[in-house]
Image: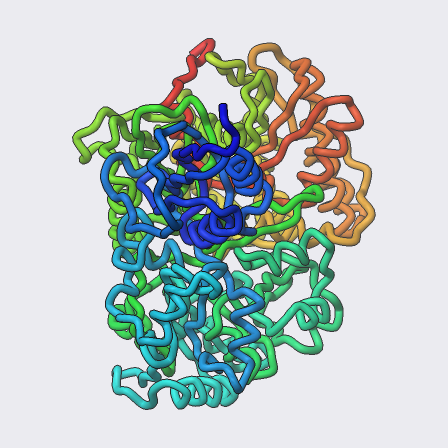
Amino acid sequence: MDAAAPHRLRIAIAGAVQGVGFRPFVYRLAREAGLSGSVCNSGAGVLIEAEGAAPALTRFLDRLAADAPANAVVTDRQVVRLQARFTQGFTVTPSAADGPCSAVIMADLATCPECLRELRDPADRRHRYPFTTCVACGPRYSVIAALPYDRARTTLSRFPLCPACAAEYADPGSRRFHAESICCPACGPQLALWDADGSVLAMRESALTGAVATLRAGRIVAVKGLGGFQLLVDARNDAAVAALRTRKRRPRKPFALMVADLDVAIGLTEVSAAERAALTSPAAPIVLLASRPEAAQVLAHAVAPGAPCLGIMLPTTPLHHLLLRELGFPVVATSGNHAGAPILADEHAALRALAGVADLFLVHDRPIAHAVDDSVVRVIAGEVTVLRRARGHAPLPLAWPAVDAPLLALGGQQKNAVATGFAGRIFLGPHGGDLDGAAARDAFVRAAGSLPALHRLRPARVACDRHPDYAATRHAETLGLPVVRVPHHLAHALSGMVDRGLDGPLLAVAWDGTGYGRDGTIWGGEFLAIDPPRWRRAAHLLPFRLPGGEAAAREPRRAALGVLHALHGAAAAEMTGLPPVAAFTQAERRVLATMLARGVAAPLASSAGRLFDAVAALLDLCQRASFEGEAAMAVEAAAAGAEAAALPAPMVSGDRPLVVDWRPTLAALLAARAAGVSVGALAAGFHVALAAAIVAVARATEARQVLLTGGCFQNARLTALAVAGLRAAGIAPFCHRQVPPNDGGLAVGQIAFAAAPLIEENA
């Protein structure tokens, strides 16, 4: 073949290649190589036709892989040789929107350094413009209405480009060459400051100035951010933070903070290299960080009462950078909603819903197509783990080759997130919250329709939890599709397997608060042996009764009473020297004792989460919980910095399944507490004992790989101890990374099961 003769290649690129500057990158690369042809977005990613001499094409292909934009992720590249056309020049052509739409929807990206420099430069035409963006940053998923990603298919389509922006958009030398989110003060969205009645108080720069003055005065401002509303208040002001707690009906759950820069974060918290990388990443999530003593001197006590960690994030948009720079102090930045309701994205809806919560509203006229909350991450066992997958992470895909026919999964009741799967990938949508209220359920129904619609999918099946009373399960039954009901804890395990690319055999330790068990009990302390195409319940925690059923999830004292009944029988109700027993009246104790003795309205539970609740109540850390996980968080917090008391590990006995008997551990804990051992030492010892039980079951089942999954493994201490113990035993441990270990990851496991169902042994 004549190397000098022209050759033509069609190159199809799949992955996260739309909305990251990939077409401008290809254009410049082709021009530098002297190639002719074109590049465009397609329904599958990016499509290139490149023509030139063979050596130039080879170099072009090499640089496509080596020099791709920082936020691009190429998952597949297919190259087909075509007949040369002897064309001249290289162009960016209109997107090809026909055919299947499998392109990756890029997640929203935090402001890049170049846009931040422009924002602060008085000589730049975008100086102090709150919506500055380029190919490397800005809104993506939150503004897209349809694929492929082009301005005409985003909510920015209502803002025609001014001549200056149009020139940048067409200039190959510009950072905004084919930047679909491009805008400026002359042609882009604008700010407005509204009072509680919706009257306009100020516009543009004056709106920003008014919001800053309001925050300085200790009042609450609802800010329309990138993916929805946030409630902001001065984090130093005790009265202001207390007012926000009262108005939002959020008595104790920690608030997230936004700080101006990394230096402020380091002044308030301990920041490791991994945590620093997470804070400053394009995803810009909330990062849970250990607080420094100095934080208590700066922040209001009500920001995170009793919590050893602070949730910190850096400014995510130019608007936030402007606000934080002007203010010069940290702000509480919490989701713009009432407790239990979905995040609000429309300013008129926010005005109605947040009446009586926010004093003023800082809004803008760029519509939000998809509401998306802030992501939350934590470094666990040395690695960044996503606890809430939302802005910056969703809906980026995960590879899972078993997925073929298009599928929809609806997740669970708590921390709901929906997912779609097709063509070897699973797309997990953003965190949607709990489905206990009507507004949350309405938002869930919209999400369940919009995520597959973006890819123009018609699901072949819908997957959901086995629990018959979950709102997501009931919705699945209305869709007219074959329904696949997935065991709750198996879905947890499969989500972790997808996350880490594991195919078994392995032992999945699935620990959480509540899951529907096929034997009529509440599961939650499960050890699942998975060896596709089969799985079985290899072990579980010893069940104990929960008087009042679901009420025990809100009242740890009830779980403690169930534990005491398992230890002491009927005498438990008379042990009034113990805090959880004393927390009930004599009449209440009589009723609860009868429920426990007869097993009436007191279901059996193997739940590790409820066992943590019981310990929290026994140590008098939490008798009534105001939010999910409060009691378990209190036990972990109490253990911080404490030397662990020596407690016996739970006993492992039985056969199929093994039973992990925690009674020796809890009996020793109670005896040690009576002897005056500190709460912190006992909380730390409880963690050590549970980690030892995990290692013991892994050894007993001869597991070579162990996956830690479920909400209990948001606990960094428990997870780190289990990982260290497994490694010491020569067993490979795996933890979640990109998929939340809590119920926010259930839909991923449901897709995996619907694509390749597993058979339960001994069912």
Q: Is residue 735 above or below residue 96?
A: above
| In-front residue for pair 300/128 | 128
Q: Whole-percent x and y of residue 201?
A: 32, 90
Question: In this orientation, does residue 459 appear?
Answer: yes
How many marks the image carries: the answer is 0
Residue drawn at point x = 54 percent, y = 20 percent: 503
Q: Whole-percent x and y of residue 71?
A: 52, 51
Question: In this orientation, does residue 741 appear?
Answer: no
| Quadrant in which residue 406 is drawn | top left
Q: Whole-percent x and y of residue 508?
A: 57, 25
Q: Is residue 267 left or right of residue 388?
A: right
| In-front residue for pair 306/209 | 209
| In-front residue for pair 156/472 | 156
Q: Is residue 347 left or right of residue 290?
A: left
Residue drawn at point x = 33 percent, y = 26 percent: 485
Q: Whole-percent x and y of residue 219?
A: 45, 84
Residue drawn at point x = 31 percent, y = 34 percent: 408
